[in-house]
């Protein structure tokens, strides 16, 4: 096989790309994974992982390394509405069959680099600092990706199939006409701050009148602070993200006065707009995983889990598709969207219910109060954490308890 030709070419070495790559390499497939960044690289993220995410990390063989590094144990989450109602849910009391009684706050610098190292050890060829600019068919049974020229990297790679794991603004999904921008259009501002007061063993989410704020304890006195606002509100941050960040923190009652101003251990990173989804998660010679396939909102904090799980599904379907010669058309990949629907549909509905209810903060506040009073907070954290079935909430009895 030529050095610039492989079975599977994965664009993006985040959790979705690495998960797909490791599972495929274990099945003996020849995999090249390309990323525009050099690892370790950072990513705007609240860095919250539920017990179910840890189950996937264990299956990928990296949980030992994560546990040995400085990562903060999380007991669950507290959600506070705009009028002060709050709920606290703990993983250990949520029911279902959690992998562990706790989650972890894992810095993305550590998590993503650990996964990339594991991919290399599994036999994946990882090409860093190579930006993919396009994808097209090259002959009857090959796909070609083009790269921004850089010393030592070929200008293109050919593969039987291309996996788009290049995140929220996926170039591959756009070039293939699969990308669709949702209408919610939120922006996020994320920093690491030392000395945030009042942090316990839970992550915190505070909903305000213009979006929400997440606090996630990273250990050693450092907290991940994430502000999420509609894009039209974020437009006034241009050229002054730090000032904008603190002005908005000061407006939310549960946050005001808790986040010291001159104590960044990592500057504000800005990302968005989201939500974005794909029209389809497969096309001829192309498969979408992770945020490239679907990303709604970080509130429920489980994009990493979906990315890891999606990678495992993608690898299983690809392995079967690669077993026979000939072009890998969308028909051969059709089991993948079906698997995604079965695994994610209920969670997608819950995420969207939460995301849209937040557009009416008083209504959201009332629902938070009801969930706490009716003893449903732990279950909700289990559902958003992917280890309690979403259909425990998506049924008439549970819905009535939340609304009436
Ligand atoms: C503000 C915010 C907070 C979040 N908080 C959480 C949380 O607490 N917990 C959680 O589970 N999820 C959270 N998420 C979601 C989570 O970050 C994503 O779902 C997850 O990173 C998806 O992984 P991925 O591999 O699909 O994409 P990414 O992690 O974005 O990785 C994509 C990779 O593709 C590379 N790439 C992009 N374009 C190109 C190109 N043209 N050529 C080559 N390489 C390219 C990038 O460099 C990157 O390494 C949050 C998201 C946001 C925005």
Image (spheres, rainbow, N blue to C red):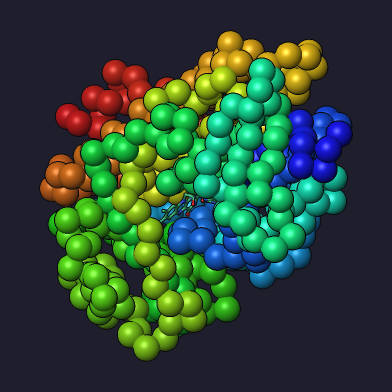
Residue 274 percent location from the top left of the image: 34, 46
Residue 399 percent location from the top left of the image: 27, 26
For the residue pair 309 and 41, the one nearer the viewer reads as 41
Q: Is residue 296 visible?
A: yes
Residue 140 percent location from the top left of the image: 66, 18
Residue 163 to residue 264: above or below: above
Residue 326 percent location from the top left of the image: 73, 14
For the residue pair 73 and 401, the one nearer the viewer reads as 73
Residue 281 to residue 194: above or below: above
> In the drawing, does residue 96 fall left or right of residue 170?
right
Residue 344 to residue 295: above or below: above
Task: Classify residue 17 by image quadrant.
Answer: top right
User: What is the quadrant of the N terminus in the image?
Assistant: top right
> In the drawing, does residue 287 fall left or right of residue 300?
right
Q: Can residue 18 be seen in this view?
A: no
Report the residue at 31% width, 38% height from top. 181
Residue 396 to residue 360: above or below: above
Report the residue at 71% width, 67% height from top. 69
User: What is the quadrant of the C terminus in the image?
Assistant: top left
Report the residue at 57% width, 73% height from top. 219
For the residue pair 79 and 400, the one nearer the viewer reads as 79
Report the residue at 13% width, 48% height from top. 362
Task: Classify residue 136 by image quadrant.
Answer: top right
> In the drawing, does residue 274 fall left or right of residue 342?
left
How many numbered markers are drawn?
A: 0
């Amino acid at each position: 096989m030529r050095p610039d030709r492989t079975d599977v070419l994965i664009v993006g070495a985040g959790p979705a790309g690495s998960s797909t790559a490791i599972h495929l390499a274990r099945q003996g497939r020849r995999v090249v994974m390309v990323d525009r960044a050099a690892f370790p690289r950072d990513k705007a993220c609240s860095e919250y992982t539920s017990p179910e995410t840890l189950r996937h990390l264990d299956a990928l063989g990296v949980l030992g390394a994560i546990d040995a590094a400085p990562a903060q144990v999380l007991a669950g989450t507290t959600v506070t509405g705009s009028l002060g109602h709050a709920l606290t849910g703990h993983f250990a009391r949520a029911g279902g069959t959690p992998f562990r009684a706790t989650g972890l706050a894992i810095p993305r610098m550590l998590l993503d680099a650990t996964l990339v190292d594991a991919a290399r050890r599994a036999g994946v060829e990882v090409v860093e600092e190579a930006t993919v600019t396009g994808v097209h068919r090259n002959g009857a049974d090959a796909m070609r990706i083009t790269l921004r020229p850089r010393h030592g990297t070929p200008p293109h790679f050919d593969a039987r199939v291309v996996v788009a794991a290049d995140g929220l603004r996926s170039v591959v999904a756009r070039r293939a006409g699969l990308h669709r921008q949702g209408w919610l259009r939120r922006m996020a501002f994320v920093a690491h701050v030392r000395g945030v007061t009042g942090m316990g063993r839970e992550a915190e989410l505070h909903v305000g009148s213009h979006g929400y704020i997440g606090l996630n304890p990273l250990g050693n006195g450092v907290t991940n602070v994430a502000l999420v606002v509609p894009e039209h509100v974020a437009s006034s941050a241009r050229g002054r993200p730090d000032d904008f960040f603190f002005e908005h923190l000061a407006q939310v009652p549960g946050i005001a006065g808790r986040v010291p101003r001159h104590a960044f251990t990592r500057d504000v990173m800005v990302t968005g707009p989201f939500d974005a989804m794909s029209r389809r998660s497969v096309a001829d010679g192309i498969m979408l995983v992770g945020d490239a396939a679907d990303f709604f909102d970080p509130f429920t904090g489980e994009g990493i889990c979906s990315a890891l799980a999606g990678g495992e599904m993608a690898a299983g379907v690809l392995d079967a598709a690669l077993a026979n010669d000939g072009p890998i058309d969308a028909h051969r990949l059709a089991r993948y969207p079906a698997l995604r629907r079965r695994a994610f549909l209920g969670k997608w509905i819950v995420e969207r219910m939460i995301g849209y209810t937040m557009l009416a903060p008083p209504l959201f506040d009332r629902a938070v109060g009801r969930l706490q009073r009716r003893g449903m907070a732990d279950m909700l954290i289990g559902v958003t954490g992917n280890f309690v079935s979403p259909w425990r909430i998506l049924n008439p009895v549970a819905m009535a308890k939340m609304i009436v």
